[in-house]
Amino acid sequence: MNLTSDKIEIFKEDAVINIKFNRDFYQRLVLLLQSTYKEKTEDELQEAGQQIENKNIKDEWVFHYETMLYLVKGSEEYAQQNNLTEIIDLDTYKKKMETNIEPQ
């Protein structure tokens, strides 16, 4: 986006963009989603679900949680609809996830 001293370039109000990314990036999105709720209690997660369902978000973390939730869910739906998924056994999945880069 371009920026000058008194103007900025932004998306148009009706803009819709398509992006492409691979599985490794998707896994990073999942990790980011998980980071939004990993310290939350079951009650906080239920309250977040109600805020999202009622379209009455009060907490900043719920706003970010919803954003990531829709991005991950939309990615999964697209992958399924376009035959970009596979069924693997759980042990294989765990091994694939272990090779994922995540700071400790």
Image (cartoon, rainbow, N blue to C red):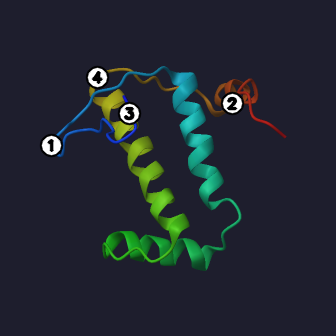
Dot 3 or dot 1: first in sequence order is 3
Indicate which disc residue 4 carries.
Answer: 3
58 or 39: which is nearer to us?
58
The answer to whether marks 1 and 2 mark residues whose Cβ atoms lie closer than 8 Å is: no
Real-space Cα distance between discs 1 and 2? 37 Å
State the mark number for residue 39.
Answer: none
Q: Amino acid at mark 1?
A: Asp
Residue 2 coordinates in the image, percent (x, y): 36, 28
In the drawing, does residue 90 fall left or right of residue 81?
A: right
Instruction: Where is residue 90? Give x, y as percent.
Output: 64, 33
Residue 17 falls left or right of residue 19: left
SS assignment at label 2: helix
Inspect the image, locate mark 2, and give the three-letter code of the amino acid beneath it: Met
Q: Nearer the viewer, mark 3 or mark 2?
A: 3
Q: Which numbered marker is on residue 97?
A: 2
Q: Residue at x 44, y 70 (%)?
A: 49
Picture quarter with the N terminus: top left
Residue type at mark 4?
Asn
- Quarter of image, res 81: top left
Measure how far apart labels 2 and 4 are at the Cα level: 23 Å
Q: Earlier in the sequence, mark 3 or mark 4?
A: 3
Q: Secondary structure at mark 1?
A: loop
Nearer the camera: disc 1 or disc 2: 1
Judge whether 95 appears above or below 72 on screen.
Answer: above
Q: Which residue is mark 1?
A: 14
Find disc 4 in the rendering and name its residue.
Answer: 82
